[in-house]
């Protein structure tokens, strides 16, 4: 009788689809514990990488095949089987070209492989193996600037009338502001003294523009109306064509908001549109994703005029707030609003989601070394809509903060314990990701509670269920009524609908909803649920937990 009255009272309280959290139900109804994906009714992954998960590789730090301490192309080739088993659909390689820097974002030769990384034959073999495993390869393409040691630049500074002079931006040392204000310097309309550097030899009475550094002279594409006719544009088209011929699937374009000086004008989107359309003539299915490091998605959206995909930094910043404040319920709406904005500029806009990357604090460190939060971040990223990117080492919880140098977020990957790790790079002594602070991959594979296991589980689910990979995103209509710590949303394709619930808090909470549930397919964190009747479910969620139902 007690149970009957409780159920009647509970059902009367249901006025919508999702309900406010309720007290724990009477202990009499059966409670089903769920702590391992194998206990659920998830379909087996058929091996198809439909999830579209990309993996960023900082080449120097990833895998060293020849024991010289530096990551290399052969090392990547040797580890492709690992990435394939993890379910990775594509890899993005940071610059592989000859460069005076360790990071490679100042290029000396765009059509060559840095000798420390291997040979062109090594690269071709890597692409061949990746293709055999169903893994796409995209390369970093730095279009904003070159290295100051690039032959284009060393020739350009030798005289005022050589063939490469117009590849870069010059002005007399005594009148840089005047030249800019009078329109004699293309692509720029404002003078910032820190962006102008003394020519080191030859035409020393001139300065050149290098927005990031004197090591990185900016390329001159001319006025936006005629940029496609400039020599640098032609060169960049030839460079892309060269690598397409080597089998790459596309490019990650560096610093797209800085190609033209004005970030908010239409110049950069128009330039990118012209370049993308030019490459589509060569490879109709070319994939390109742009880096516009901006914290406001409204400023990123116009760049979809030019490119099919852009990284969504704002989504990560908002997710940090969600995790640090246990204020989660509005996040699906935020992502939906972002996607709608992007779609207003390009039908089929690809929202490239991410946590950290090579220019940001590592996820675990940014979240205060709280492993529960790092797992929660992974769970949300891999169940949310978008095209997710993982930075190498995120899957094992590598750490690092930029405060004392970018190198700290680019440390060697930990494959095995240091005494047994034949692939660990040694180019830098790590300050953050050491054996004492980060269990190596070999250890985490054996630990069901590791960060790696979370990535493995949810990547596999994303590859298995088309709705997680590419389904529409919707969310409950009664966002105002339930606790802020719950993140609830749906992913759906024809014939398949999933409901995802995250408890983004440090306390156990109960969530009740009305749906006809086929089964529970996966969880994180020992979630339990009680079936009240055919369409009523109560879910008890431990701190920082997730459950996915098939409806």
Image: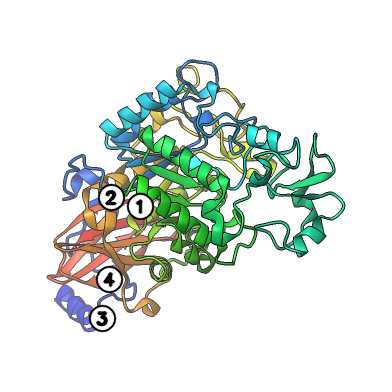
Q: Residues at badges 3 and 2 in contact (C-beta under 8 Å)?
A: no
* C-alpha separation, residue under disc 4 versus residue under disc 3: 11 Å
Element type at mark 1 = helix
Q: Residues at badges 1 and 4 in contact (C-beta under 8 Å)?
A: no
First of labels 4, 3 by sequence position: 3
Which circle marks residue 512 in the picture? 4
The residue mark sitting in front, 1 or 3, is 1
Q: Residue furthest right?
A: 174
Q: Name the residue at 28% across, 54% down.
A: 469
Residue 546 coordinates in the image, percent (x, y): 33, 56
Q: Name the residue at 47% across, 51% down.
A: 355
Task: Name the residue nearer the viewer: 75 or 34.
Answer: 75
Which circle marks residue 382 in the picture? 1
The residue mark sitting in front, 3 or 2, is 2
Q: Name the residue at 38% across, 56% down.
A: 380
Whether residue 517 is visible, yes or no, is yes
In the rendered image, the quadrant that contains the C terminus is: bottom left
Q: Which residue is mark 2?
A: 462
Residue 443 coordinates in the image, percent (x, y): 40, 29
Residue 391 coordinates in the image, percent (x, y): 46, 42
Q: Which quadrant of the figure has residue 411?
A: top right
- Determine whether 463 is above or below 131 in the image: below
Category of crowding for the residue at label 4, using alpha-carbon neighbours closer than 10 angstroms: few (below 14), some (14–19), many (at least 20): many
> What colour scheme has been applied to the protein in the rendered image?
rainbow
* C-alpha separation, residue under disc 2 versus residue under disc 1: 7 Å
The residue mark sitting in front, 1 or 4, is 1
- Determine whether 62 is above or below 338 in the image: above
First of labels 3, 2 by sequence position: 3
Task: Name the residue nearer the viewer: 165 or 123.
Answer: 165
Element type at mark 4 = strand
Q: Which residue is mark 3?
A: 16
Q: Which quadrant of the figure has residue 486?
A: bottom left
């Amino acid at each position: 009788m007690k149970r009957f009255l409780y159920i009647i009272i509970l059902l009367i309280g249901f006025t919508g689809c999702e309900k406010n959290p309720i007290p724990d139900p009477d202990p009499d109804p059966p409670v089903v514990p769920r702590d391992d994906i194998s206990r659920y009714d998830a379909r087996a992954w058929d091996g198809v990488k439909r999830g579209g998960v990309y993996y960023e590789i900082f080449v120097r730090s990833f895998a060293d095949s020849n024991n010289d301490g530096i990551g290399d192309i052969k090392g990547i080739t040797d580890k492709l089987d690992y990435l394939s088993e993890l379910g990775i659909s594509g890899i993005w390689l940071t610059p592989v070209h000859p460069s005076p820097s360790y990071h490679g974002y100042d290029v000396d030769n765009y059509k060559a492989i840095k000798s420390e990384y291997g040979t062109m034959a090594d690269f071709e073999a890597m692409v061949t193996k990746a293709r055999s495993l169903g893994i796409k390869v995209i390369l970093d393409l730095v279009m904003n600037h070159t290295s100051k040691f690039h032959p284009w630049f060393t020739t350009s500074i030798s005289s005022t009338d050589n063939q490469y002079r117009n590849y870069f931006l010059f002005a007399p040392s005594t009148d840089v502001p005047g030249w800019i204000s009078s329109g004699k310097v293309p692509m720029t309309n404002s003078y910032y003294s820190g962006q102008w550097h003394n020519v080191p030899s030859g035409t020393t009475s001139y300065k050149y523009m290098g927005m990031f550094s004197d090591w990185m002279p900016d390329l001159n594409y001319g006025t936006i109306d005629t940029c496609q006719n400039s020599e640098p544009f032609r060169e960049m088209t030839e460079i892309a064509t060269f690598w397409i011929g080597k089998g790459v699937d596309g490019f990650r374009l560096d610093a797209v908001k800085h190609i033209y000086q004005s970030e908010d004008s239409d110049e950069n989107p128009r330039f990118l549109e012209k370049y993308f359309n030019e490459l589509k003539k060569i490879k109709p299915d070319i994939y390109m994703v742009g880096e516009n490091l901006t914290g406001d998605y409204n400023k990123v959206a116009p760049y979809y005029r030019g490119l099919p995909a852009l990284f969504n930094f704002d989504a990560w910043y908002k997710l940090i707030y969600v995790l640090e404040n246990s204020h989660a319920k509005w996040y699906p709406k935020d992502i939906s609003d972002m996607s709608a904005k992007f779609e207003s500029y390009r039908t089929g806009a690809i929202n490239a989601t991410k946590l950290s990357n090579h220019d940001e604090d590592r996820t675990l460190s940014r979240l205060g070394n709280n492993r529960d939060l790092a797992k929660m971040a992974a769970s949300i990223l891999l169940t949310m809509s978008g095209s997710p990117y993982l930075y190498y080492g995120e899957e094992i919880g590598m750490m690092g903060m930029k405060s004392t140098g970018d190198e700290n977020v680019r440390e060697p990957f930990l494959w095995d314990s240091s005494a047994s790790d034949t692939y660990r790079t040694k180019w830098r002594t790590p300050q953050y990701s050491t054996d004492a602070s980060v269990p190596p991959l070999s250890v985490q594979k054996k630990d069901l509670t590791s960060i790696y296991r979370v990535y493995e589980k949810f990547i596999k689910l994303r590859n298995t269920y088309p709705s997680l990979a590419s389904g529409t995103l919707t969310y409950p209509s009664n966002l105002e009524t339930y606790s802020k710590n719950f993140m609830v949303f749906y992913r759906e394709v024809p014939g398949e609908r999933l409901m995802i619930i995250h408890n983004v808090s440090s306390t156990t909470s109960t969530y009740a909803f009305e749906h006809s549930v086929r089964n529970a397919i996966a969880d994180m964190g020992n979630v339990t649920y009680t079936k009240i009747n055919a369409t009523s479910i109560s879910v008890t969620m431990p701190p920082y937990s997730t459950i996915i139902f098939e409806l």
